Image: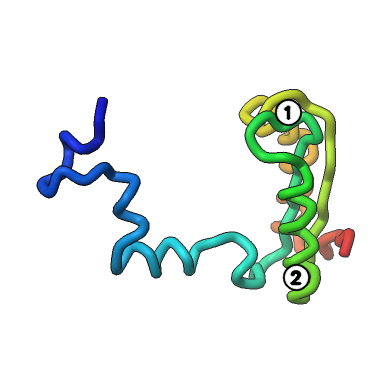
Amino acid sequence: MNSRLLTVDGHPLTVRPQRAPWDRIVAEQQLGRRKPRVPVLLSHSALDDVFPQQVGRNLAAVWCRRGATVRFSGNHIPGHIAATDATSAEGLPWLADRFAGRTAPSTC
């Protein structure tokens, strides 16, 4: 469906983030602009078919430079969505350790 048919002014929904106030709101939420306040586990596949793994590595590096606690975990799980399910074997124990008060590991 053409999103132009869903708006009063006939502009597609894709132009909304380019206009005030949405342009500012979207910019403020760009990953990497702010230091995470909590430890981060960033898992990213070398076989991601949506975002190259280097994007994840770069984000981890930016957060590390800002003083965040980041554990970057590369893997070779094919696909973008499939990797989410497969990485839960690492993510769930990592999260349980945070709730248990254990210090988060860092690759910074």
Q: Residue at x 84, y 35 (%)?
A: 75
Left-right relation of 28 to 108: left
Work out how far the residue at label 2 is from the one at label 1, CA to CA, in angstroms: 25 Å
Q: Nearer the viewer, residue 27 or 84?
A: 27
Q: Which residue is mark 1?
A: 86
Q: Position of residue 97 (x, y in %)?
A: 78, 54
Q: Is residue 35 above or below residue 6?
A: below
Which element type, helix, strand or loop, lies under badge 2?
A: loop
Q: Is residue 107 above or below residue 7?
A: below
Mark sitting on residue 12: none
Q: Residue at x 73, y 28 (%)?
A: 86
Q: Where does the C terminus fall, quadrant-wise?
A: bottom right
Q: How many other residues sit within 10 Å of disc 1, few (<14), some (14-19) or many (≥20)?
A: few
For the question of whether residue 96 can be seen, the reply is: no
Q: Residue at x 75, y 52 (%)?
A: 41
Q: Position of residue 79 (x, y in %)?
A: 69, 26
| Disc 1 residue type (three-letter) | Ala
Marked residue nearer the N-terminal end (2 or 1) = 2
Q: Is residue 50 above or below residue 27?
A: above
| Residue at the outermost bottom position | 67
Left-right relation of 45 to 27: right
| Disc 2 residue type (three-letter) | Ala
Q: How many other residues sit within 10 Å of disc 2, few (<14), some (14-19) or many (≥20)?
A: many
Q: Residue at x 72, y 35 (%)?
A: 88
When asked about the image quadrant of residue 99, the answer is bottom right
Which element type, helix, strand or loop, lies under badge 1?
A: helix
Q: Nearer the viewer, residue 4 or 58?
A: 4
Q: Which residue is mark 2?
A: 68
Q: Position of residue 100 (x, y in %)?
A: 75, 58
What kind of colouring is applied to the model shown? rainbow
